[in-house]
């Protein structure tokens, strides 16, 4: 093994003073290897292997889960008179306040908007509650 950590050259000859060192040496004893010190500037391969690259999580997403109640919300927006009125005002650019109509759903302050009498309210609250164990305050803040 080539490394730029000079202290690892003395791995087998140093005095073992901690339980952690003892455990690591015990694990490494099962492998047949020797340690060779190589300056960091000369050991470019090791530097490339150990370098942390920025991880762009957006590139990893192949698909996103779509809640099964999303279609019900879109259907409700087409059948509830109050939601139809709000949607029409948003589309006519007459809505007062931070309203949006995106992908068939109504958003208020970038949050999903449901009618007060929507049967989905209880379903969504249960789903949010069951999806986390962060306590009541954080669950409440996620629903706001």
Image (cartoon, rainbow, N blue to C red):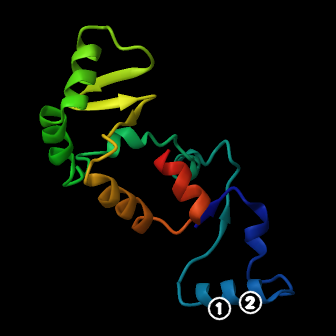
Would residue 143 appear left or right of 74 to someone viewing this image? right
Q: Which residue is mark 1?
A: 26
Identity of the residue drawn at 25% across and 52% down: 65
Q: How many marks?
A: 2
Would residue 59 appear left or right of 52 to someone viewing this image? left
Can residue 103 be seen here? The reply is no
Position in image of residue 99 (x %, y %): 38, 22
Q: Tell me which corner region of the image, top left, top right, bottom left or bottom right, holds residue 80.
A: top left
Quarter of the image that includes the N terminus: bottom right
Position in image of residue 117 (x %, y %): 29, 47
Q: Which residue is mark 2?
A: 22
Q: CA distance from mark 1 to mark 2?
A: 6 Å
Position in image of residue 106 (x %, y %): 29, 30
Could you classify mark 1 by the number of other residues whose Cα lies within 10 Å: few (under 14), some (14-19), or many (20 or more)? few
Identity of the residue drawn at 15% across and 45% down: 71
Would residue 134 appear left or right of 81 to someone viewing this image? right
Q: Is residue 13 shown above or below 123?
A: below
Image mark for residue 137: none
Can residue 95 be seen here? The reply is yes
Identity of the residue drawn at 33% across and 59% down: 122
Identity of the residue drawn at 41% across and 43% down: 57
Callout 2: SS: helix
Q: Is residue 142 shown above or below 1?
A: above
Q: Is residue 77 shown above or below 13?
A: above
Query: In the image shown, does 98 or 2 lie closer to the viewer?
Result: 98
Q: Are marks 1 and 2 in contact (CB under 8 Å)?
A: yes
Callout 1: SS: helix
Could you classify mark 2 by the number of other residues whose Cα lies within 10 Å: few (under 14), some (14-19), or many (20 or more)? few
Position in image of residue 47 (x %, y %): 59, 48
């Amino acid at each position: 093994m080539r490394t730029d950590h000079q202290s690892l050259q003395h791995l087998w000859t140093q005095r073992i003073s901690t339980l952690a060192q003892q455990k690591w040496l015990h694990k490494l004893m099962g492998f047949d290897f020797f340690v060779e010190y190589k300056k960091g500037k000369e050991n470019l391969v090791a530097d490339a292997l150990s370098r942390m690259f920025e991880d762009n999580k957006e590139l990893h997403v192949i698909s996103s889960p779509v809640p099964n109640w999303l279609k019900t919300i879109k259907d409700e927006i087409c059948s509830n008179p109050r939601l139809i009125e709000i949607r029409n005002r948003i589309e006519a650019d007459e809505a007062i306040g931070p309203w949006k109509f995106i992908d068939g759903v109504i958003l208020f302050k970038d949050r999903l908007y449901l009618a007060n009498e929507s049967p989905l309210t209880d379903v969504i609250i249960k789903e949010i509650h069951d999806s986390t164990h962060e306590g009541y305050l954080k669950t409440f803040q996620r629903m706001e």
